Image (tube, grey):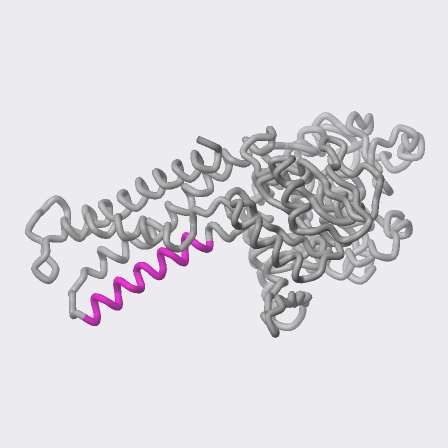
Amino acid sequence: MNWRSSYVRRMKIVDALVVVWAVVGAHLIRFGLGDDNHVAGTPYVLVTVFLPCAWWLMLAAWGSRQPRIMGSGPEEYKRVFAASLWFFGALAIVSYAFQIDLARGYVGIAFPIGVFSLVAGRWVLRQHLGMAREKGGSTFSLMLVGGRGAVDHLAAALRRFPQAGYTPTAAYLQGSTVHALEEAPDLRFFDGPPTASAILNAVRECGADAVALTAGLHLPPSTIRQLGWELAAANIGLIVAPALTDIAGPRIHMQQVAGLPLIHVTTPKLEGGKKVVKRLFDVVLSGLLLVCFSPLLLAIAAIVKLDSPGPVLFKQERVGIKGTPFVMLKFRSMDADAEVQLAELQNLNEGHGVLFKLKADPRVTRVGAVLRRYSLDELPQLLNAFSGSMSLVGPRPPLPTEVNAYEEHVRRRLVVKPGLTGLWQVSGRSNLSWQDSVRLDLYYVENWSMTADLVILFRTLRAVLKRDGAY
């Protein structure tokens, strides 16, 4: 049994346990252990037996257990929710049409508990699958077909995110004689467009589970269509990777025009109602956190004052939205003359690009080391978020010297307010390269949504507890 069959089997077992637990639990909460409850002449016990079976089958019919949606992305969760919603919607329609007086409390308990538990169960399974994929297992082997530059780009992206479950195993290059994949062979080099049968033979040679057609590949539509037919007959997946990078799913809309799949890409704009909602969210949540954390803030302030001479707060000029400077607040975690000592430490810089980072920074105080480890030194930035110079979620607030060294495309980070946390915070912090830091910030700017902000805030707690990259 391969990993896909094993994973689907575990998924079926978890789904079955969850729907049985949700429906039986709803029955016990609503009716207790009595056996004198009936609906349309049928004991509720039989209804409680029927519903989990039908619900479980609905999850399968909706494609929520398909291997291609396993491990990453929201599609799996969307299908679980949609299947459950349609199932209970159909149940309500049937009840109304045939005048079956199904207890509302019974359904009202089973549906939310079941949906939440199904999503939670899938999440747990996904974490185990993600850990296996980080170790190199439970992945789809992928043959990349196209120009060398596009193949390199796609291979690098897949390596950055092993949880997606695709492992490049071979490259079939067009118009190149330069090796593309260090850990896998290049099967063919070809100058002109290959035939569908030639690509299929190469797939069989490397034993790939799927083929990815990348940019830089010049194939006539008839060849791609023929390739799709032959791959489908051989139960091998076909993936088309367009030359679109760092674009989130909600921005992509597919439209069929004259038999052609056209991809429309929209750009989110943080203005109007969205801007008001984000600002209101920042004010309300930062205000609540300031009130809740006020005892902790006072305690840290006292400890910092007693630990070393100097002010409690460290104030530093940073660059905000549209290049506007502002004063960012942090608890002082270094010696009072840390900025003066910086020039002497420049040759020891362990940071990337224009960033200065030093793991064993001699300027950090004893208390400061603890504050940095748990990101407690950044709590005063809640005042920045409350006042409006920062947001709770956004790109990393840069120094003026960093902005002066920006390349032109990097300045797009300044389109939105900098954040107390962001993709850089939940993706490795100081362990990130300069290029990855820029890529994540630009991705946030290009794909902003309120839902993404909530997800980042949730992931921030986990990143802080792991303390990875905090120094």
Where is residue 292 drawn, in percent x and y? 53, 46
Describe residue 360's horizontal placement relative to residue 226 as left or right.
right
Predominant secondary structure, magenta span: helix
Q: 392 or 301: nearer the eye?
A: 392
Residue 365 image-quadrant placement: top right
Please tell me which residue is depicted at 90% across the width and 30% down the height of the picture.
345
Q: Is residue 104 above or below residue 463?
A: below
- Nearest the viewer among 286 and 147 is 147
In this picture, which residue range is highlighted in magenta?
78-97
Instruction: State which quarter of the image contains the C terminus.
Output: top right
How many numbered markers are drawn? 0
Q: Residue 358, image x and y in percent?
A: 81, 30
**Relative to residue 226, is residue 31 drawn left or right?**
left
Based on the displayed image, in which of its 4 quarters is residue 206 positioned?
A: top right
- Residue 90 in magenta stretch: yes
From this view, report whether residue 233 is shown above or below residue 220.
above
Image side of residue 247 versus residue 68, left or right: right
Q: Quadrant of the N terminus?
A: top left
Give the image location of residue 78, x and y in percent: 46, 55
Q: Quadrant of residue 42?
A: bottom left
Task: Report whether residue 94 is seen.
Answer: yes
Residue 246: in magenta span = no
Q: Is residue 300 visible?
A: no
Residue drawn at x 27%, y 52% is 54
- What residue appears at the point 77 percent right and 56 percent down from the top-left corner? 413
Q: Is residue 36 above or below residue 97?
A: above
Residue in the foreground of this view, choosing between 309 and 249: 249
x, y percent for residue 132? 54, 31
Q: Nearer the viewer, residue 429 or 23?
A: 23
